[in-house]
Image: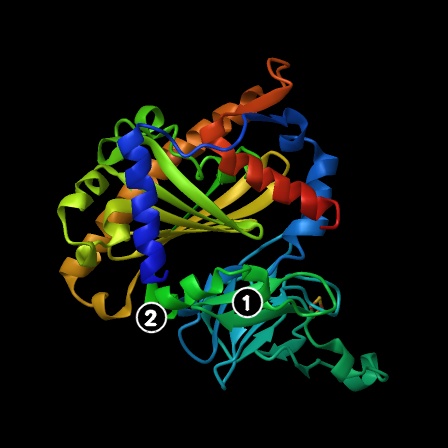
Amino acid sequence: MERATEIQLANELLELHARKSAFLNEAATTSPVEIYFDPERFKAERDSILRTAPQPIVHSSELPEPGSFLRRDFAGLPVLFTRDADGAAHAFLNVCRHRGTRLVDDQNGCKQRFSCPYHAWTWNNRGELVGVPHEKQGFPELDRGAMGLKRLGSVEKYGWIWAWASGEEAPNVDDYLAGLAGDLERFDAGQYQLVHMDEEVCSANWKILVEGGIEAYHFRVAHRDTIAPHFLDNLSSYESFGPHMRSIMAKRSLAELPEQPVDDWRLRDHAQVLYSIFPINQFLVQSDHFAWIQLEPISATSTRIRLSTLAPSDRVESDDDMAHWAKNHAITSKTLAEDFDIGESIQAGLESGANEHLNFGRFEGALADFNRHVDSRLNGG
Ligand code: FES
Ligand SMILES: [Fe+2]
């Protein structure tokens, strides 16, 4: 982020801390419980949000060289990402065009061609059909040009391969980022490498999991055994950029900043800076690395979560550095496991009839804003 913004955000939290106030929205709000378990609602969200929004699905370092490929499902679709001989990244449905078998079984690797395990129709990593056994006899009219792998929209930018599943027109990622592109560009995530990734399936609606990451009200209680001692109680701010959000959660050390020259202030050392890229990605700026949380909504009540640690590319060689990233990844993973356990606990009681609505306090305004954006997209906004 820009230097002036960094100082302004630190000052805003310092001023709230001095007044012993949280960052407050106008009013407390509510959220109806059905939106977290209704399958029809989930289908509508999948069609009008999850499949249309361009999302960072794969980090550039996950396709490190020409020929690299990996499988990663998103928005309910099986997807094959490839990097061709010219270095360009592509996203295809991982489905054979003959009779629909899954084309690639390996999770990742390096290959120029993909041959279907059923009858060996073969495509190159640009998605062009290059081989059909007994083609002349069996498929005399076959138009190979029309039988390329089904392509999804994708673009490589700011260190990620962004993909989207539908929509005739390619969305402009910068327009979509609605003012956050500058911050992402400055972080230069392309100069980082993905050094750890955990995956797990959590029995909770994806929105419950997003909501769990954008307020600091729960830190003191839910994270008392992990990060709570490092944070000021219930002190965070946020700003919306279109449907996206930048949240700043104050660490205890922030309170000491006034004793230091402003030129030395470095916000990421004294606060957790979290970018929520609507709808399913969160990018957490740590002192010397990034954590990346990606949700893959599977159903109304189930979500796959991927937690990755991205480390600077010039610090991934030595054992000391790698041990440092492993330790940091484990701390983030343990903290998030606390959030995801709570998410499952919320989900388990949603249909009990105890609540018609969930309640968002004035200092949980980010949750209301997030849901407002979900509603607006569902209604064609
Ligand atoms: S289903 Fe793939 S080659 Fe037949
Ligand atoms: Fe949390």
* Ligand 1 quarter of the rendering: bottom right
Residue corresponding to mark 2: 191
Residue at 44% x, 34% y is: 340
Residue at 50% x, 40% y is: 210
Q: Which of 289 and 184 is in front in this view?
A: 184
Going by the numbered disc 1, the residue's amino acid type is Asp
Residue corresponding to mark 1: 174
Tag 1's secondary structure?
Answer: helix
- In percent of width and height, residue 174 lies at 55, 67
- In percent of width and height, residue 330 lies at 28, 44
Going by the numbered disc 2, the residue's amino acid type is Gln
If the image is split into quadrants, where does the N terminus sit? bottom left
Q: Is residue 266 above or below residue 85?
A: above
Residue at 71% x, 80% y is: 132
Q: Nearer the viewer, residue 313 or 238?
A: 238
Q: How far apart are marks 2 and 1 (CA)?
A: 19 Å
Residue at 85% x, 84% y is: 140
Task: Say whether residue 267 is left or right of residue 32.
Answer: left
- In percent of width and height, residue 98 lies at 75, 69
Task: Say whether residue 256 is left or right of residue 89.
Answer: left
- In percent of width and height, residue 329 lies at 29, 48
Tag nearer the camera, 2 or 1: 1
Tag 2: Cα neighbours inside 10 Å, few (<14), some, or many (≥20)? Answer: some
